[in-house]
Image (tube, helix red, strand yellow):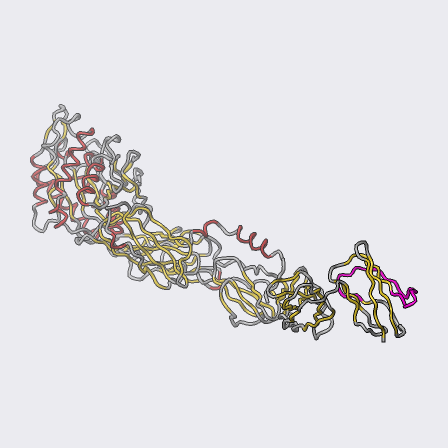
């Protein structure tokens, strides 16, 4: 039977649970993609997106689904939950999902034993659409910070400012909407310029998200781009010497990082003004340098990417006149129309918005609107049907195993890359051993120098699990016919052992024990690291109580007894299914019915009190038909065995025995709540009078002693 006790276990459990870090509520988390990430779709309108993440509690598998972020912004084909990875290990999961172009809300959830663990983790906005890298000079970079923002939520940029002209790999991108708060359209663009307007036009036309990456640099000539692509120090027409490998460095870095990881449809190139004035670059020089620039980028990324080349040359000269260069335009067309060209015809911008305030730029809302529409016109259905994008690379999956002594993790990445650089710290090599909490990932480089961020592992707490605490600590006890449950509070995997044994008794946070012994538990976290042994908890099994027997002991009472002496037992009584309040071995039967009793014994072990119960006795049917309120029995009686019972309880009853002559033999005073023995001895045979009296009753009974 289940025991009935009160201990401080509940308080201990509550205290333990309140100390669990709030971070455990995120039991599964996506690390890639991140919010608002956009992946380039393939020619068929789809993309295979790598999904990676971490989990902190044991799970059997990871499921994923993606639903439209808003009605009509994606198809429902991916809305059903599907398997992302079965049997993940080491606290990391990875897989891929095939998505049609659209703007999605993505969720993953962990499954354990067929049940969802915790709550799904949500990326509220991510998508498959179009990725463009912008390059050129100021009409590509932008000059007006007050340009109209995009109105569509699906128009995005990378928030990164490389005005320091670093040649190092950029940090993992932060994606944002092209809104009124934009300052730098990473790595160097200024404000929304015409790209917010173009983004709105494209999302309306294509119904997919758009990402812009702006590498343009004001005042640059084609010579500056071509020379810097060769590692040559270059200067502009005003004598400014560009930083090492700039301006080309931003374009190369963006292509080798962002384009490799997220894909790209094309480079949007708008440059030529400075080559019109003051440089007056010749047709051959411009054509040769632009083609060399395109070829160099192709070599640096190990592939071909389409350049959408705007036919642009208009600029204000030193007289304030807005002039154009047929030589520059002709050179741009020559590159576009060249044999085996990877270029595509962009907008012809010289005839547009000729009344420019400064003679050069598409400044103001009207100007950038005209320019945005011009770009939209050339990015036509034919463009998207014929221009193949640069494919995105899968995210390298990370594996994690527990190291020696359960105090370190060994992280590994796939083979096949030319170099590995771990973050933080810059360690090289395919593996990394970590001993402290932190966020760990790597930059992996292919043979062409393209870089992809690996999967990230977040270690939120100590690598070795904390020693588990058995909530029912110390010595415990249980009744023979029930199991006692030891438990721990936590989210790891737990294994239970008998003290001194290496055989696992059971796993899980609870252990129901039905045999005596001393026990310990160990925890194992999702990394596979094992804790030290817990403190020992022991269990004493109390012996089974014998089933009592009951018998009628008087006209108004029945009595229970057990075959085993010295138990100091009490009894629970019931009449039918109704539990009665008495705990004595004798109970008054003032109502007819079937009576039964069970024995109970309270055991104390330290501060722990346990009550064990026997089975109920066989029932005894009692029919109450006694006419008298007070009965003296047996009558005729024996000289030393004489009892009195009252139907109703009598307080302070005075019992007096008289002989036939009226002499008092004995007097006793007590409550008549159950059978009472009349204190007489060695009575002679004959008749006697017994008087029972209290404040409410005064009656006499005649008895015969034989």
Q: Is residue 664 magenta?
A: yes
Q: In which quadrant will I find the N terminus?
A: bottom right
Question: Residue at horizontal 43%, vertical 56%?
Answer: 56
Residue 286 located left or right of residue 196: left
From this viewpoint, is residue 216 visible? yes
Q: How many marks?
A: 0
Image: 241 above or below 297:
above
Q: In which quadrant will I find the C terminus?
A: bottom right
Image: 626 above or below 140:
below
Region of the chain picked out in magenta, as a range: 657-676
Question: Residue at horizontal 17%, vertical 25%?
Answer: 357
Q: Position of residue 422 (x, y in %)?
A: 37, 54
Residue 635 located left or right of residue 142: right
Residue 450 located left or right of residue 702: left
Comparing 193 with 338, the one in front is 193
Quadrant of the image occupied by residue 193: top left
Question: Residue at horizontal 22%, vertical 52%?
Answer: 100
Residue 309 located left or right of residue 548: left
Comparing 481 with 394, the one in front is 481
Q: Position of residue 521 (x, y in %)?
A: 54, 64
Q: Is residue 237 magenta?
A: no
Q: Main secondary structure of the magenta part?
A: strand
From this viewpoint, is residue 585 visible? no
Q: Position of residue 570 (x, y in %)?
A: 70, 65
Q: Position of residue 335 (x, y in %)?
A: 10, 44
Comparing 446 with 25, the one in front is 25
């Amino acid at each position: 039977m289940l025991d009935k006790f009160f201990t401080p276990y509940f308080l201990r459990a509550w205290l333990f649970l309140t100390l669990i870090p709030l971070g455990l509520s995120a039991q599964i988390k996506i690390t890639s993609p991140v919010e608002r990430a956009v992946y380039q779709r393939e020619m068929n309108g789809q993309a295979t997106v790598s999904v990676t993440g971490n989990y902190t509690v044991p799970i059997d598998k990871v499921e994923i689904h993606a639903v439209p972020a808003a009605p009509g912004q994606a198809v429902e084909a991916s809305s059903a939950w599907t398997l992302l990875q079965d049997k993940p290990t080491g606290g990391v999961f990875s897989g891929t999902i095939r998505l049609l172009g659209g703007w999605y809300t993505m969720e993953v959830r962990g499954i354990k034993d067929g049940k969802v663990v915790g709550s799904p983790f949500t990326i509220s906005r991510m998508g498959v659409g179009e990725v463009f890298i912008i390059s050129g000079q100021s009409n590509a970079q932008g000059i007006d910070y007050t340009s109209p923002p995009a109105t569509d939520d699906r128009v995005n940029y990378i928030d990164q400012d490389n005005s320091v002209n670093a040649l190092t790999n950029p940090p993992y991108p932060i994606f944002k909407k092209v809104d009124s708060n934009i300052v730098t359209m990473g790595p160097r663009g200024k404000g929304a310029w015409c790209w917010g307007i173009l983004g709105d036009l494209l999302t309306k036309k294509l119904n997919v998200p758009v990402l812009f990456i702006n590498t343009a640099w004001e005042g640059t000539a084609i010579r500056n781009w071509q020379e810097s692509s060769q590692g040559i120090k270059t200067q502009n027409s005003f004598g400014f010497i560009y930083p090492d490998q700039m301006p080309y460095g931003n374009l190369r870095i963006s292509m080798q990082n962002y384009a490799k990881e997220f894909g790209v449809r094309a480079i949007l190139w708008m440059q030529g003004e400075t080559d019109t004035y003051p440089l007056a670059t010749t047709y051959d020089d411009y054509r040769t340098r632009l083609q060399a620039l395109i070829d160099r980028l192709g070599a640096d990324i190990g592939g071909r990417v389409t350049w959408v080349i705007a036919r642009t040359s208009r600029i204000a000269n030193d007289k304030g006149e807005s002039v154009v260069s047929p030589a520059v335009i002709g050179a741009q067309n020559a590159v576009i129309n060249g044999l085996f060209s990877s270029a595509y015809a962009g907008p012809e911008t010289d005839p547009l918005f000729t009344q420019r305030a400064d003679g050069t730029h598409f400044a103001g809302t009207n100007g950038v609107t005209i320019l945005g529409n011009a770009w939209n016109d050339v990015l036509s259905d034919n463009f998207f049907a014929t221009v193949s994008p640069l494919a995105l690379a899968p995210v390298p999956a990370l594996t994690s195993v527990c190291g020696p002594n359960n105090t370190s993790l060994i992280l590994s990445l796939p083979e096949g890359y030319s170099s590995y650089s771990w973050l933080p710290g810059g360690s090289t090599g395919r593996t990394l051993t970590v001993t402290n909490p932190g966020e760990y990932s790597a930059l992996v480089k292919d043979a062409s120098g393209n870089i992809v961020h690996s999967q990230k592992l977040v270690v939120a707490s100590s690598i070795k699990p904390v020693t588990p605490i058995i909530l029912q600590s110390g010595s415990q006890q249980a009744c023979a016919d029930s199991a006692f449950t030891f438990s721990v509070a936590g989210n790891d995997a737990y294994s239970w052992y008998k003290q001194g044994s290496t055989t696992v008794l059971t796993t899980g946070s609870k252990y129901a024990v039905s045999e005596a012994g001393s026990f310990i538990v160990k925890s194992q976290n999702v990394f596979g690291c094992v804790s030290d042994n817990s403190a020992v908890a022991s269990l004493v099994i109390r012996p089974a109580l014998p089933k009592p027997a009951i018998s009628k002991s008087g006209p108004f009472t029945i009595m229970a007894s057990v075959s085993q002496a010295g138990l100091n037992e009490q009894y629970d009584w019931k009449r039918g299914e109704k539990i009665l309040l008495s705990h004595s071995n004798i109970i008054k039967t003032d109502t007819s019915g079937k009576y039964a009793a069970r024995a109970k014994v309270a055991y104390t072990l330290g501060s722990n009190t346990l009550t064990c119960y026997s089975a109920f006795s066989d029932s005894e049917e009692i029919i109450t038909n006694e006419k008298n309120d007070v009965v003296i029995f047996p009558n005729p009686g024996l000289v030393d065995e004489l009892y009195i019972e009252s139907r109703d309880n009598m307080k302070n009853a005075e019992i007096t025995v008289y002989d036939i002559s009226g002499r008092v033999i004995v007097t006793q005073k007590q409550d008549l709540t159950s059978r009472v023995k009349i204190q007489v001895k060695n009575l002679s045979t004959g008749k006697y009078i017994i008087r029972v009296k209290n404040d409410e009753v005064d009656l006499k009974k005649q008895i015969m002693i034989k």
